[in-house]
Amino acid sequence: RGSEYFHEQLVFVLVQFISKDSNMIVPIVCGVLRYWPTRSATKQVLYMSEIEEILNFMQPDHFRFVQDRLIRRICRCIESGHFQVAEYSMALLNTEFIYAMIFDNADVKKRVLPSILAALEKAVNSWSKTVRQVAEDILKFLKDNNVD
């Protein structure tokens, strides 16, 4: 219950570490993914906001070290029964950086796209109208841009 109260300050400190030494990105992201909360939707959203903040500093060479674990976690969150977790994870997936890292590299695309599509297909059947709509929009975008 306590981490929500000081999470913003922790993210600030992480960002300071990263801005001073960009090589800290990979261990920090791996640590965040390792200790990902599974039962608290509020904490999952906080962790996703932390990942989003870190992505602002990430370079492509850093991304390749965490891409599989990160995409796997985003996919699990898309499949979440909690609407805020699913919505935020789809917004995270829908960022320009993530798209560039996945779809500009044929090997990465081939490896992670099936799990992304599977997660989005599950989200299309969500109880939440917003989650369904966002998932359908992303799938339509991917289909319209021949990303399959």
Image (cartoon, rainbow, N blue to C red):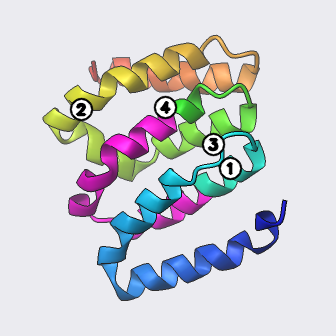
Whether pointer 2 and pointer 1 mark residues with C-beta atoms closer than 8 Å, the reply is: no
Q: Secondary structure at mark 3?
A: helix
Magenta range is 49-75
* Disc number for residue 75: 4
Tell me which numbered mark, 2 or 3, is placed earlier along the sequence: 3
In this rendering, the label closer to the viewer, 2 or 4: 4
Q: Residue 102 at x, y = what percent?
A: 28, 40
Q: Which residue is mark 2?
A: 109
Question: Which residue does the numbered mark 1 point to in the structure image?
Answer: 45
3D distance between C-alphas at marks 2 and 4 = 14 Å
Gap in Å between the C-alphas at discs 3 and 1? Answer: 7 Å
Q: What is the number of callouts on the image?
A: 4
Residue 88's disc is 3
User: In terms of sequence position, does the residue under pointer 2 or pointer 1 come before the other?
Assistant: 1
* Circle 2/circle 3 CB separation < 8 Å: no
From the viewer's perspective, is residue 86 above or below residue 118? below
Q: Is residue 126 left or right of residue 109?
A: right
Q: Is residue 33 above or below residue 80?
A: below
Q: Quick check: is 95 in the magenta stretch?
A: no
Residue contact at pointers 3 and 1, CB within 8 angstroms: yes
- Packing grade of label 4 (10 A; few <14, some 14-19, many >=20) is many
Residue type for callout 1:
Val
Residue type at the position of mark 4: Cys
Q: Earlier in the sequence, mark 2 or mark 4?
A: 4
Sequence-first tag of 4 and 3: 4
